[in-house]
Amino acid sequence: MGRHKGRKGKSAKNAQANQPLDGKEDLYLKAPHSFVFHRGHVGKTVKELVLDVRKLMEPYTASSLKVKKKNVMKDFLSVAGPLHVTHFIVFTKTDVATYMKLICVPRGPTLTFKVNEFALARDVLSFQKHPDVESRLFTNHAVMVTNIPSDNMEHRLMNVTFKNMFPSINPNTVRLDTMRRTVLINYDPETQNVDLRHYSVKVVPTGVSRAMKKLMKTHLPDLGHHKDIADIFLDKGLSDSEGEQDGPHNQVTVSQKIRGRGITHNAVNAIRLKEIGPRLNLKLVKIEEGFEGGNVMFHALVQKTPEELEALKQLRQNKQKEKLARKQRQEANVKRKQQEKAMQKQKSLEGMTLNKKKENQEQENESSGDDEEDDDLDYYREEVGEEPEPELFSQSKKRKRTSSSQGEPKRKQARPNGKKGSDSIQIQKTKGKNKRESKFSFKMTSKSPQNKKIGKKNGIKGFLILVIASPQGDLRLSGPPSGQGPSGRARTCRSLQGWTH
């Protein structure tokens, strides 16, 4: 079986996807784009109005734009450049009325309108007997038609702002088949209000009876209650779905080929407009020179004298100077903090290197301390003449300390026989007056029940015994002297009862 005639292969699709930008995409990038969103609490109805206005601005708008409460105008302005956005349409609501702002991005001006009345698209379609809204209507932009006069500054600026929101068309090169929608803006000089309407444009043949138009539609009428097709042409009860009658006011000669049933080339056809919503009745309130914060060029409610305008201009300039100075201070503070952070990092690296050197030195000292302990053991054997008990020098070893530890390490009391509640001994060697004499201080602490009972009775917890070894090999014991202890009770040598050492 051969390949389908109209089907493209994978290579052809990839080649088509990798083609450079053509003329249509260039026009899309050059066309004005818009953001339509609301600020603050506006209610459910105004939110639906925002969606309808987005539909009106299709396809050059962000139809799925998500707005959060924490977003500010600076967030929208920061992404407007990469997305080629040229206009913001912002809706706000107060206790007085609903307002709509037209902002030219990025430098203004800003036009503020008061929304006197509005109707949603679903409300407009609900009054029509045969609403006709196709998705293909929104594949191309709408055509802007306005009658705003140019007699003063605010009218000229309003006229130019509305026209620049939609792409311009060239009558010599435009395709009539793409002009499916139009936006009409009517200015009422008496009330100074602006009415905005949104219509769909449709070309229909002229000189055709209503019965024939029924048969020319895509969906044929119900013929179940007719015996012959001739009854359709002779039936007087049929009514046209369009309320507008054809006449010289809407008949034109189409010079291009347009898709549609019964539309012929270079023939007289009629143009039908059907409203698809929304409706807006606006009144211009204020025009600002910049982006939501410039000089007020026009205000419909407040009139200021030249002196007041000059004072406001001076105040705004002072605010700009303060803002610039504050920005410079912030940049200087950021630079200073970065330098301090770099210096602190350098000091930290130097401190880490110094701590590492100290740790190495402590390890060397510990190794030398072990040698001194061996010398003490040999000296004890030589002077006393017998082997020392294992627990006498168990606490002489130094515990390894890390660089992060602070203070002296706690000494753990030795427990002879490895039993809980036994007595403990600490020993310390010092030099006596005679160079050949040594002093060994034994600090004994009792934890046995019998010694605890004696210590509780006498008010002592332990005592110190001084052992002096002479060159002749004799030992002299020096115990706690008689007298009053810290607790006011007598300290005697009877507290030696019950000790095993």
Image (spheres, rainbow, N blue to C red):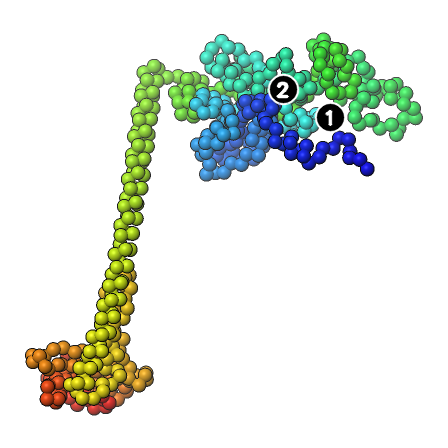
Quarter of the image with the C terminus in it:
bottom left
Is disc 2 placed on a helix, strand or loop? strand
Q: Quadrant of residue 198?
A: top right
| Residue that carries the numbered disc 1 in the rendered image | 130
Is disc 1 placed on a helix, strand or loop? loop
Give the label, 2 or 1, closer to the camera: 2
Q: Earlier in the sequence, mark 2 or mark 1?
A: 1
Q: What count of labels does the image hold?
A: 2
Local crowd size for mark 1, using a 10 Å CA cut-off: few (<14), some (14–19), many (≥20): few
Residue under the point 29% across and 52% down: 349
Residue 334, given in percent of the width and then of the height, sits at 32, 39
Residue 58, given in percent of the width and then of the height, sits at 60, 27
Residue 205, given in percent of the width and then of the height, sits at 77, 15
Q: Quadrant of residue 294?
A: top left
Q: Closer to the camera, 173 or 275?
A: 173
Name which residue type carries label 1: His
Q: Is residue 213 left or right of residue 472?
A: right
| Residue that carries the numbered disc 2 in the rendered image | 182
Residue under the point 27% across and 62% down: 359
* Res 50 seen here: no
